[in-house]
Amino acid sequence: MCTSLIWSITGIDYNEVNSNIFLAFVTFAKKMNCEFIAEGIETEAELQRVIDLGIDYVKDFLL
């Protein structure tokens, strides 16, 4: 199993373009049987969005 790491997810909760790009990476990783680690989550809204997208792991959660 491979691991994918996304470094910056800033604005994923309110920016549709960022959210769609992130969703494309998540979809690709899932099809390749990769686990996903989202890093740089700074708000509760960003955390909820990555949970909604089915992210496997989260790092650096800060409110």
Image (cartoon, grey):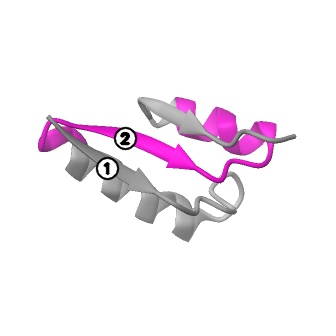
Write the start and end of the magenta stretch as one range: 30-51
Read off the residue under disc 2.
36
Read off the residue under disc 1.
4
The secondary element bearing badge 2 is classed as strand
Residue 7 image offset from top left, x and y in percent? 52, 61
- Identify whether 42 is placed above or below 14: above
Within-10-Å neighbours for mark 1: few <14, some 14–19, many 20+:
some
Say left or right for 62 vs 39. right
Residue 32 image offset from top left, x and y in percent? 12, 44
Task: Identify the residue at image location x=42%, y=65%.
Answer: 21
Figure quadrant of the N terminus: top left
Query: Observer-nearest residue: 3 or 33?
Result: 3
The secondary element bearing badge 1 is classed as strand
Task: Identify the residue at image location x=67%, y=62%.
Answer: 10
Q: What amino acid type is highlighted by mark number 1?
A: Ser
Say left or right for 61 vs 36. right
